[in-house]
Amino acid sequence: MDVKNIKFDPESHIIELAKQRPEGISNKDLKENMPQLDLPELTGVINKLLKGGVLELFKSNEELLYKYKDPSKKTTAKGSDNEEKVVYRIIEEAGNKGIWIRDIRFKSNLNMTQLNKVLKSLEIKKFIKAVKSVTASKKKVYMLFDLEPDSSVTGGAWYQDQDFESEFVDVLSQQCHRYLVERLDDAKKQGGSPVMVRNRSYATAAEVHKFIQDLGISKISLSVSDIESILYTVVLDNNAERTTAANGTFLYKATHNFIFPPGLVKTCCGTCLVANKCAHTGSVNPTSCTYLTDWLSGS
Amino acid sequence: MSVVYGKIVSLIIMERFGLVLAKVASFLFKTPDSPLLFIKRGTELPLSKIKESLCILIKHGLVTFRPNKNENLANYSLDSNKVLLMLRYPKYLNFVKKQFGDESEIIIEEVLLRGYLPASELILKVYDRMSKNCNKPPSLSIIKDKLVYLITSKYLKRIPSAENKPVPNLVQNETMMHVLPPIELKTLITYQNDQRTVLPDKNIYWTVNFERFHQDMRDKIVVAAFERKFDEHAAEIIKLFLRQMYVRTEPWSDISNPIPAMEVKDILKRQANSSVALAFFDQYLTVMEQDNSRLLRKAGEASGGSYQIHLKETFTQLVWNLIEQVILEKHDTKAARIFRLVKLKPYIEPDRIQQLAMIPAKDAKKLSYQLYEENFFRIQELRKTPTVSGPVKNFTLFHIELDNVVRMLLEMCYKTLFNHITRRNHERELNTRIIDKKQRVDTILMGMKSQGATPEQIADIEELITPPERVVLDNIDKIMKKLNTVELEVDDTIFMLFIKDCDEYATQRTSSR
Ligand code: SF4
């Protein structure tokens, strides 16, 4: 080994040196072996090697040791590319519906710790992302980073970060109902025969959709089928009825209940939530019941 | 029958007839079909008292009897449904008053008070009462006409005549039920002057035919429902359909016979104020027929089409509606929504509930279980056969059993009634002293007024009740009024729940005869 050679390539020299001494080389050894390198230069080289994963840093007896890292033993580092590739492919296959970690494990045959590591690194590299599914709050599914998650995962327009936007839905439901009622009132005002009034009061989901769009209450864009599901809640609330038109689409129309609230619920006992604990004797009883007292003294 | 039910039965009897009768009644409620001595042992009352009580109860149709194995003894049972009807009396009276006027109201009231009585006696009683209370009493003949009308339109019926046996079998002669007795005004007038005159119909007794009232109440509900759902003209048409229905069908059948539309139209033509209903008659029929509720259905095309009213179906739908409203008031719209969803799709998966009802998963689950806890829902557990590995999955599917819910709601109504009556009694008890005082003062005032006392004297007496006492009295008055109104309203709910099963209702009627 001549000096020139060393001067040319301090890296390989250090590697050689480290290879010869599997127990590690110290700073002192380096100095002795390469007196021609000044300290800053040496530090630069060592750092580069450490970063590249060729050398590893150890500490023994208050002394820093550099050890050569065997590339054949380095499978985890090197091979992880392959695993990443496999996992990546599995995730890619799942498309925008995503895939659950358990299924990745079955498909990839990796163990949990390994898989977690791979997923983490893929995630850091922004190849994939984890999306919380709305169907099960603790379940995460993975999909490629730039995919828009399917509505079955996000729950569609009604979810914001897998939280159901209840209020948003309620507002929409109210507005849809309002639209139908207005439509019915208009039809009645225009007059005409009962059949005509009825037919005029029917609205399609598309019409309601346009109304909602024009209202501008929704930040996100809603599809007609989104509106269709909102309208179904209005139907379920018995505020509208749904019929099928000749062409197969649904028609909606505001309706009334058959009856007014029954007498039973006009009393406080009829709506009382502790009624099943209420008896003639006992701490909950009609003679001393404060609900009754309040209700009786009310107007 | 439930405990609460028994309790209200005895409370009602207690309120109207006193403690002894209530005791007998509740004994009979618990042990139906008891002979006299049995009642004596159970109630520990003297025999004479029991006999008297039974007499009164039988007279009011609250207790029925039938021969024991030993034909000389009778077994007594309480007709608890009839007892509950007593809560409805104000409603019957109100109805008659509105429909047929004051005389008719007093006629019915007298009959209700006495249980049953002969026609001539009834006429005289009403006459007496009315001449005492108003300055221009109606003539006997007017009262008679009113009575005759009530009998022919079946609001009153003849009570069955008894065979001559130790324990008589009551035989109802259906044809005679609403046949008029011979009433001569002349005899009545002679009787007024000479009480010894024999009235010709003294053995023909009349009593109130509740069923007829119920039929009217039912029709009113149906018509009101149509009015709310469609409009007043549609309701008008339905009213006529119902009326025509009785021409052909038993009033309480599930489905009416086909009614020709032309017939109804003809009646409409004769009515002055139904031009809209008439002008769009066919269209109204189309709209009602095509409605999702399908209460009016076309039965045939002949002669302008004929239609059937599906009464049972109507009431089933009304009851569904009622249940939904109860849930709506008791919980909120979300719970009602889930209820309707489960009604439309029984055994729906919980996941689908939250999806279709658009309610957050957690709330949906909470509400469903709440409804289950309150007996609106029933649960069906489904166990997915465990695969080799993986957790066992359980599905909990909800569904509704209507009859069950109805029973539960009835129970709720009874309980509410019980609570209210208890509370009313309690309030009254708390303030007995003041109430008594007020009554005493009132009697004194009455006496003084009839003796022509001066205004100052009257004012003096009136001042016996101090201002604070007056406040208390006013307050009690308000409370009583409120409790009374609500009682009547709860009874409306009971009525609705009851007539859902027209046929069941009919059997109940026959048993109560
Ligand atoms: S008395 Fe009071 S506690 Fe009892 S059911 Fe009525 S409101 Fe509820």
Image (cartoon, coloured by chain):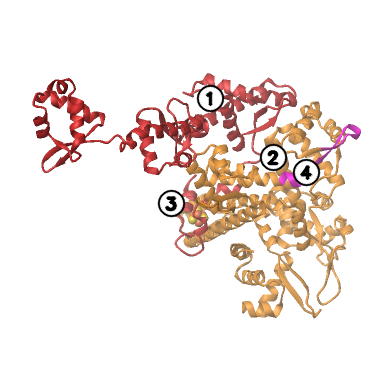
Chain colours: A red, B orange
Cα separation between marks 4 and 2: 14 Å
Residue B97 visible? The answer is no
Mark nearer the viewer, 3 or 2: 2
Quarter of the image that includes the C terminus of chain B: bottom right
* Element carrying mark 1: loop
Instruction: Please indicate whether residue B350 sits to the left or right of residue B209 in the image.
Output: left
User: Where does the image place residue B425, in percent across and percent down from the top left?
Assistant: 53, 61
Q: Amino acid at mark 1?
A: Leu
Q: Which residue is mark 4?
A: B310
Q: Amino acid at mark 2?
A: Ala
Mark nearer the viewer, 4 or 2: 4
- Numbered mark located on residue B467 in the image: 3
Name the residue nearer the viewer: B6 or B208: B6
Q: Which residue is mark 2?
A: B225
- On whether residue B303 falls in the magenta region, the answer is yes
Disc 1 residue crowd, few under 14, some 14–19, many 20+, Cα 10 Å:
some
User: Where does the image place residue B82, in percent across and percent down from the top left?
Assistant: 70, 61
Q: Which residue is mark 1?
A: A222
Q: Which residues are magenta?
A: B298-315
Among numbered discs 4 and 2, the one appearing first in the sequence: 2
Among numbered discs 3 and 2, the one appearing first in the sequence: 2
Label 2 is found on which chain of the structure? B
Cα separation between marks 1 and 2: 37 Å
Cα separation between marks 4 and 1: 42 Å
Mark nearer the viewer, 1 or 2: 1
Name the residue nearer the viewer: A34 or B417: A34
* Element carrying mark 4: loop
* Element carrying mark 3: helix
* Element carrying mark 2: helix
